[in-house]
Image (spheres, rainbow, N blue to C red):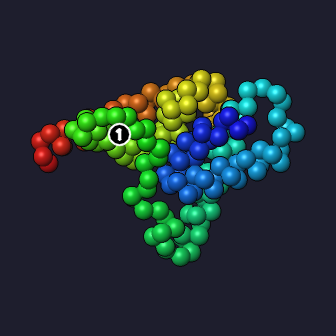
Amino acid sequence: MLPHLDAAYTLAFWLTRDEDRARDAVQEAYLRALRFFGSFRGEDGRPWLLKIVRHACYEMLDRERASAADQFDEEAQGADGAATGAVLVFPLGPEAAAIARARRELVHDSLRAMPHDYREVLVLRELHGCAYKEIAAIAGIPIGTVMSRLARARRLLQAKIAGQVKREDTGT
């Protein structure tokens, strides 16, 4: 399961929107995977592991929401300034690097603002290259729902990015 560590972390990061929570969720998921390795039937391990990561993330978020209902704590809710994840560095000039960083931030901000259901299928498909069948198994939803959520997620992401670009171009 170690070859899937990056995929597990990336999924956890986009579901939790926080590096520390993502690390905690991945650690919890790997512990569960180890504990329940006997239920693994020798198929491709990535969908099995990502399903465990997904459940760990949602359980963590549910626990945090429950504790936040008892006592409001802005730090426990997570700041909007969550880290943007891993960044690849290429030898670019200052202007090209600034443009690339702005584009990356725009996509990340738009992705963060999406509802969980859409963000989840988009991350699994576009960042991890999961097949529709794998996404259906990971998310526990029918394959038709995967396809419709993915189509809606792409349209929503495109609209968010286009709206932001338009606002920046007009200065409003």
Question: Which residue is rendered at x = 85% and y = 38% of the image?
Answer: 39
Q: What is the quadrant of the N terminus in the image?
A: top right
> Percent position (x, y) of residue 99?
25, 38
Q: Nearer the viewer, residue 135 or 79?
A: 79
Q: Nearer the viewer, residue 118 or 90?
A: 90
Question: Which residue is rendered at x = 59% and y = 70% of the image?
Answer: 67
> Percent position (x, y) of residue 36?
83, 44
Is residue 40 visible from the viewing direction of this image? yes
- Category of crowding for the residue at label 1, using alpha-carbon neighbours closer than 10 angstroms: few (below 14), some (14–19), many (at least 20): some
> Percent position (x, y) of residue 30?
73, 47
Q: Kindly state the secondary structure of the residue where label 1 is placed.
A: helix
Toward which corner of the image does residue 53 lie, by quadrant?
top right
Q: Pointer 1: what residue? A: 104
In the rendered image of this protein, does residue 93 appear above or below residue 75?
A: above
Question: Which residue is the extreme one toward the right?
Answer: 38
Tell me how many marks there are: 1
Disc 1 residue type?
Answer: Arg
Is residue 149 visible from the viewing direction of this image? no
Compared across the picture, whether 132 is left or right of 152 comes to right
Question: Which residue is the extreme one toward the bottom?
Answer: 71
